Amino acid sequence: MSTVSSTAPNSGSSAVSSAGTASTPAALGERGMQPGYNFAYLDEHTKRMIRRALLKAVAIPGYQVPFGSREMPLPYGWGTGGIQVTAAVIGAADVLKVIDQGADDTTNAVNIRSFFRKVTGVATTEKTGEATLIQTRHRIPETPLRAGQVIVYQVPIPEPLRWLEPRETETRTMHALSEYGVMHVKLYEDIVRHGRIATTYDYPVIVNGHYLMRPSPIPKFDNPKMHRNPALQLFGAGREKRVYAVPPYTDVRSLDFEDHPFTVERWEEPCALCGATEAYLDEIILDDKGGRMFVCSDTEYCGTRREQGHRGKDAA
Amino acid sequence: MYVAVKGGERAIAQSHVLVADARRGDHALAELSVAQIRQQLRLAVARVMTEGSLYDEDLAALAIKQAAGDLVEAIFLLRAYRTTLPRLADSLPLDTGRMRIERRISSAFKDLPGGQVLGPTYDYTQRLLDFSLLAEGGQPAESAPNAAAAPLEAPRVTDLLAGEGLIEGSGDQGEDRAPVDLTREPLLFPADRATRLQNLARADEGFLLALGYSTQRGYSTTHPFAAEIRFGAVPVEVFVEELGFAVEIGEIALTECQLINDFHGSAEAPPQFTRGYGLAFGHAERKAMAMALVDRSLRADEFGESTESPANDEEFVLSHSDNVEASGFVQHLKLPHYVDFQTNLEMLRRLRADWESGGEPGGEDAARIMGQQQEEEGEE
């Protein structure tokens, strides 16, 4: 549909003050926010639309709810779904943490955090324990989440069956019937060919005993953290226009077979900086002669452990 | 000693400075004005408005300037602004039969009421570089003929055919069915024709061009005639409830293309011409024609035609037509993926160890492999 615009770019005519939160334009100005935009960028009608979709998602764990995804000022594929979900649920009192690959200081995490600082003025943190709202790409923090926290996952492709069946009309029916044999066959073929299940990230899970769900491209190392997690887990796919959710304390089971049980990545050595043995490690290449080291992907977890006096073999 | 990378925030800020500087270019040259872009790059402006789904020549020109001429980036900028605008009113359906025509051609009839009007077109230019344009400040030798002398209106060719009952209707959906707004509601399949057309109107010109072209080379069965292509200004009217009548709020320039295909009839429908429809903001004939080709090929099912080709596949076409979506997702590969990459690296090492040991799957403990390799290489 076309819209005829007659206003100058900075007129701010789209700002709709919200009921219930302190987000009148004046209040926003006081917090040093971007003028001309509503609190958290989206207008209140859009937020309400997204919240309704989220409520439906929470009510049907693991079910992909279509929603009227908006065009965001960040590119599709760079977290527009997660950003819309965060924008729909964030309030002035929230403390926000944004990570990408487990790290708070990767460029995209920095950019999204700065976006929300600009359009909400809320406090941000790197501490997992202090955050009320965590937006993430590709990891779940190592520090266990607690009740009351919300974690928002950025999702590139929400449909777990997409690479087995590209058609939406087909996959919708398969979900309705819990017809997931094709995914079991895929994993079985892995075992026949490679002797093991070769899926390593975005490893499919069954939520609450019914829907097959993509956990987003987190390493399968993180899958067990989703199971009966006390935090609310929300998933946003902007380009694909879907949200889904795992409510607190919900069963999340990774697909496997009796004779090939689900396993996660493990490392022989601990983190070289903090000595952690139970964390997901990134491999850092040190030189062009094969030198490498393994360090925590969760930078905040690693830093906090070092502050507490834990030392790995290469710690300064 | 390894030191973790820090400072993303400063690096980003610095890249903003650099990109602004690169956009501005040599400061010894005068800065390009938005008005100049609007006036002198009108076809770029038309494409950005069309695929940006926002009719605003000034903002489209601004987006082109800000994007340093990258039209897909400009479309993205315009879309991201458009999404914040309130919906004040819906216009009445535009009547392109009331267009003030600047250009209008039909390849189906030699002459017709209103005539063939070439207007401003590159069609019959000989594509020789005009080196006189290198010399700036020159004025065109002759001024354009006074087009305002007689505003030209002409009946649409398809309406002339409809008078004889030789062509299908244009798909009136009935008054009670408001079309879906794809920028407000998700695209769901199967999609009706109005929804498909809306998607195609926003679709990337290059994508539609290639798909449309494929239908002409045998990957579908279209052999259309250009019943009419017209370009000109069309009034926009809004029905004002308080007044009880429609008010004209302005004009927008449109390019409309009606392609017609023959159809030999079926048990349900008589033999008649069928339509493929294309519409774009501003002057954008390539886009409008490609859109019309793809619209018609997406209707193959309706007419019992073969639906084997890519251009017949609704989910394939509509899911991949949007260049803002496509550009973002393709380029998201620039984002860090080292966590996923690490899992792949680990799996590859396991499989590799299996392969080297003669195909026997090793134990479940892959990490051991990684650790061992690390130690061995560390000793070198």
Image (cartoon, grey):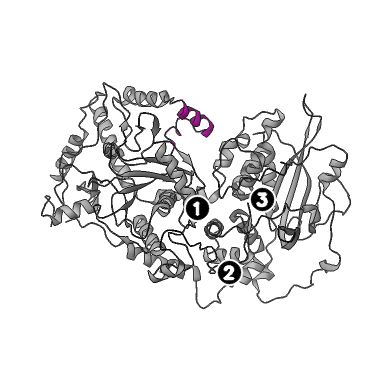
Q: Position of residue B114 (x, y in %)?
A: 87, 54
In the shown orientation, is residue A115 left or right of residue B308?
Answer: left
User: Start and end of the magenta stretch?
Assistant: A154-177
Query: Which residue carries the number 2 mark?
Result: A8
User: Which residue is painted at 70% across and 76% down in the image?
Assistant: B138
**Nearest the camera: A96 or A109?**
A96
Chain letter behind tag 1: A
Tell me the residue that label 3 is attached to.
B287
Q: Nearer the viewer, mark 3 or mark 1?
A: 1
Image position, residue A84 (x, y; %)? 44, 52
Mark 2 nearby-residue class (10 Å; few <14, some 14–19, many ≥20): few
Tell me whether marks 3 and 1 sit on the same chain.
no
What is the CA distance from the residue labelled 1 to the residue labelled 2? Answer: 22 Å
**Residue B255 location (% of width, % of height):** 72, 54
Q: Is residue B361 above or below residue A71?
A: above
Classify 10 Å Cα crowding around label 3: few (below 14), some (14-19), many (20 and above).
many
Q: Earlier in the sequence, mark 1 or mark 2?
A: 2
**Residue ID for mark 1:** A46
- Does the image show residue B380? no
